[in-house]
Image (cartoon, rainbow, N blue to C red):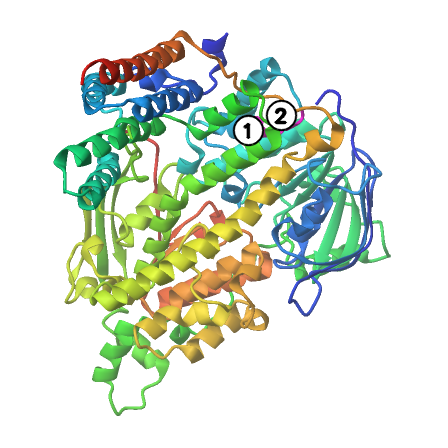
Amino acid sequence: MTGSRPAAVLVRGLTWTPLGARTPVLADVDLRLEPGERVLLTGPSGGGKSTLLRALAGVLDAAESGEATGEVRVGGETPLGGGAALLLQDPGAGQVAETVGRDIAFGMENRAVPRTAIWPRVRSLVGRVGLSVGQEHRVAALSGGESQRVGLAGSLASADGLLLLDEPTSMLDPDAAARVRDSVADAVADRALTLVLAEHRLDGWLPLVDRLVVVAAGRMVADLPVRGGGLDAHAPGPDSAADLVRDLTSWGVWLPGVPEPTPWPVAADVCAPHSRALVDASAWSGSRASARERETSSPFAGGAALLRVKDVAVARDRPRRGAVASVVHCRVEADLVAGQVQAVLGASGVGKSTLLAALAGLRRPVGGVVEALPPLAREASTHPHRWTSRQVATRVGYVPQRPQASVIGGTCRASLLATARALGRDAERRGDALMEQLGLGAVADRSPYRLSGGEARRLALATAVVHGPDLLLLDEPTVGQDRDAWAAVAGVIEAAARAGVAVVAATHDDLLADLAARRIVLTRGADA
Amino acid sequence: MRKSSGRPRRRSTGGLLASCGPLSLLGGSFALMAGALATPRASGLMAGAALLALLLPVGCGRGGFPWRRMIAAGLAVASVAWSNWLLATPHSWAVAATAGLRVGLFVVPGVVFAAFVRPAELGDHLAQRLRLPPRPVVAAVVAVQRFERLGQDWADLSDIRRVRGIHDRRSPIRAVGGFAEQALALLVGALRDAAQTAIAVEARGFSRPQRTGVPRTWACPAPWTATDTRLMACCGGVATVSVLTGALIG
């Protein structure tokens, strides 16, 4: 970017304690970046990466009040917001205008870029981040992955000295992610920008950066040089290479070349469908059968088909005045089977979330079939969209793309158990076990809005499973998870399947898709 | 250049109103309001109403205006007419009709015109054409943008409550309780969103013009076009006709 000079960053003894929190989110952080340096910020989910980025952007107290001590300097000054461009983790939250073009242009307007220069740059950024929607597309109608790219384009457009990116590819398919990495590489190529990027998965990013900084539990625990796209193992001690890999892996960092994590073993009974417990109770009343015996003899273990979907067409959004709702056509034919994991794949914006919403009975299909088969429908309608709220909740657990959306209640535990309570099911023990498994034990009594992005998503998963639904519909369940958290999430998903739940996960995560018995690939086709 | 730039443009389909800028729409509403208030007798109001009944559908074009929105305007007019009938001694239909007509003459076109005002465009025009201070204008436009999303947020909340088993519609008492809970959740969510939006605008340099003293630019121009003049002329014409008719014909 012409005219901008890379900013030096200096953080000294930064401690940040949000109002009402007992422990600081950032504790005594020191960091010094030379102008034009590129840093990859990593560490366990909930460790304080996003908070540090907000501090560098000078917007630490824009969202919540709290107590900050220490010093932050960007380009020699205290950042006041607007010096650095920050791409937020939740891209939908960062939208400031009605249309894609205007949203990307916002930062340039504030930087006093003349009008004649704005639109050519918007056009080139739209191309560079690989957006296929037009500039007049409403931002409210974008998919998660599309919003993320609009946000990135907007950040690149307004970057001046310092570019801060919070998991910029978390909601993208591998192709789009590679493209986004290229456009970030482009933007920092001439070292006119200092870059700080928060990410769990280092693959693909390492060639772009000079340093790897690890933040865990609010503290900086490692600061390592990166050379030639790999970690410089010669830095600390003699047999440090192996130690380094071990340490990083223990902090949940996904290092390229390290074997992928495997799902943790999770007891199936904490994920078992409630309907099955009823069947089991009647079949085994009085007997002291082991859980394993029950598992193998249940009618659900045989893999009953629960829901049938065929060539379904669903309206993507609610139509607005004078506009026709865009309709997603999913040319798929699939039975969702008890005990099976199926992955829904496809480029971002293709309609994965919309399909999931239709399966959950939240949208009435405008064409095709979504039919609940007898083992799932039981006394209710065969059309999920006709179910009452209670009937939906009994049968379906759902993790929305924005996990905070599923929160009901003031603490994590209250939100977790709200559905079970409404259905009159006792799920406290299961809830505690799930929170423990998913590393949420320590935050159980905290406000669900105080969680990090990864924690919020894990809470949403626990919330979907805890009351024992027959069908689990997960929208990007592994986004923002470190290695350990990923293993826990995958463990819960596997356990649910083993217990007889039919699981459908919309995802870009190949590792998660590998767990699936079947892949449903959506393609952009006759999109009306 | 304007065509090739691909920037958001005014919708060109439909009637006259769709291609009008926000200032002429607001100005036209004011002209009609002034006319309605200044018209002395029922004859003038009737002349104005007849003209509007002719012009408004043409201005809207086909499918350009959701006529359902007229329900609220209709209620307003009816309640004014009714209270005038009630309070006049003796009860007089003529007084009621005149009062209703007077209010209707500016409320109805006001509601129609407002539907064609786009917040972003209004911001552009207020700041560039009327030279209002940009900072509050930009803040207001962003706020209205978020506000427009409340409908979607409400729908999302309904979805979550439905899938979580607490969207109970079986008894009216529970339905009301649920509605109140959901409204509270919407409010809390909106406040939380406002905080996020504050971060988002600041992270993209909202305060930069103030800090550096370099005024911000605007991605879209705020032109006053011939269509805007035509709309102002029409509204001024209707107002004049109703005032003159009222003054001349008893």
| Figure check: A400 above or below A376 | above
User: Picture coordinates of residue B49 (x, y %)?
Assistant: 21, 22
At x 72% / y 24%, what residue is drawn? Answer: B214
Rate crowding at label 1 as few (under 14), some (14 to 19) or many (20 or more) other CA atoms within 10 Å.
many
Residues at marks 1 and 2 touching, judged by CB atoms closer than 8 Å: yes
Viewer-side residue, A511 vs A367: A367
Left or right of A127 on screen, residue B151: left
Viewer-side residue, B243 vs B142: B243
Viewer-side residue, A515 vs B135: B135
Residue, disc 1? A104
Q: Residue B116, located in which quarter of the rendered image?
A: top left
SS of the residue at dot 1? Answer: helix
Would residue A27 be seen by someone viewing this image from the given angle? yes
**Separation of marks 1 and 2 at Cα, in angstroms:** 8 Å
| Figure check: B15 above or below A36 | above
Amino acid type, label 1 = Ile
Which span of residues is magenta-colored?
A: A104-111
At x 45% / y 71%, what residue is drawn? Answer: A414
Amino acid type, label 2 = Met
Res. A108 mark: 2
